[in-house]
Image: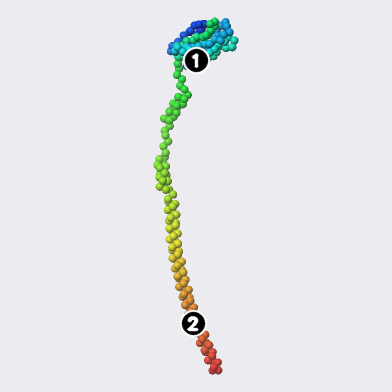
Amino acid sequence: MMMLQSHGVLVRPGETVKCNPGELYCHISQIALQDDKGNEDVRVFVKVDGNRIPIGTLSVDKYPQCKIGLVFEKEFELLHSSKTSNISALGFTFREHKIKSYSDTSTDEDDDSDEEVPLAIPLYPNADDDKSKETENGAEKPAATQFCKLKNACDVGGADDDDSDENAVDSAEVESGDDEDSNDQDGSESSDEVGEALKARLGQQKHP
């Protein structure tokens, strides 16, 4: 828990007030005009390491006070430009308290989660390698081989069919030749019989 302690200083005209937070931090929250003796604009400065830096301009009518937010971790000085008015600076001191940022917390949680959860181990570590090897070696070759075998079978079957067709033609020619021979023989026999019958008929007519 951060311990805060209110802190305030009064800066008179022409003075420079030194503030040393020591081991603490000093936070200036507000500066204001203490007296309204004039209508002048009062410029307020802070001096650190010899460098004078303006931190605000005050006016009795327009800006009698001004909210700021400056944190100092080492000695600094307050001064202003008014010759008639006092300036007050209000704030608080606090001790350094290291607050763990959300990003650091999320990073630590991610690291813990990475340590607790083991990496996934494949059930078949070489399955992908085997598939890749099959793809490289040509996994579709068996289909091509079957196609070649089918084609060769068709070629062989075609050759056998051609031979069988030729044999069938030869056998048909032989059978037709045999039929023609038999027909010729039958025709010659029938013609001989007709001739003999005519001769016998003519002989009967000559010898009644």
What is the secondary structure assignment of the residue under circle 1?
Answer: strand
* Residue farthest toward the right in the current orientation of the protein: 61
| x and y, in percent, of residue 183 in the image | 49, 78
Q: Residue 27 bears which disc, if any?
A: none
Q: Residue at x 51, y 7 (%)?
A: 11
Quarter of the image for the C terminus: give it: bottom right
Foreground of the two, 188 or 17: 17
Q: Residue 188 bears which disc, if any?
A: 2
In this picture, residue 39 sits left or right of residue 47: right
Q: Amino acid at mark 2?
A: Ser
* Residue farthest toward the bottom in the current orientation of the protein: 207
In this picture, residue 60 sits left or right of residue 102: right
Foreground of the two, 64 or 179: 64
Q: Residue at x 46, y 69 (%)?
A: 169
Q: Residue at x 43, y 63 (%)?
A: 160
Above-or-below relation of 17 to 156:
above
Q: Earlier in the sequence, mark 1 or mark 2?
A: 1
Q: Amino acid at mark 1?
A: Leu
Q: Is residue 176 visible?
A: yes
Circle 2 residues within 10 Å: few <14, some 14–19, many ≥20: few
| x and y, in percent, of residue 69 in the image | 51, 15
Residue 162, by quadrant, is bottom left
Kindly check if marks 1 and 2 are in contact, taking CB atoms under 8 A apart as contact.
no
Q: CA distance from mark 1 to mark 2?
A: 146 Å
| x and y, in percent, of residue 118 in the image | 42, 33
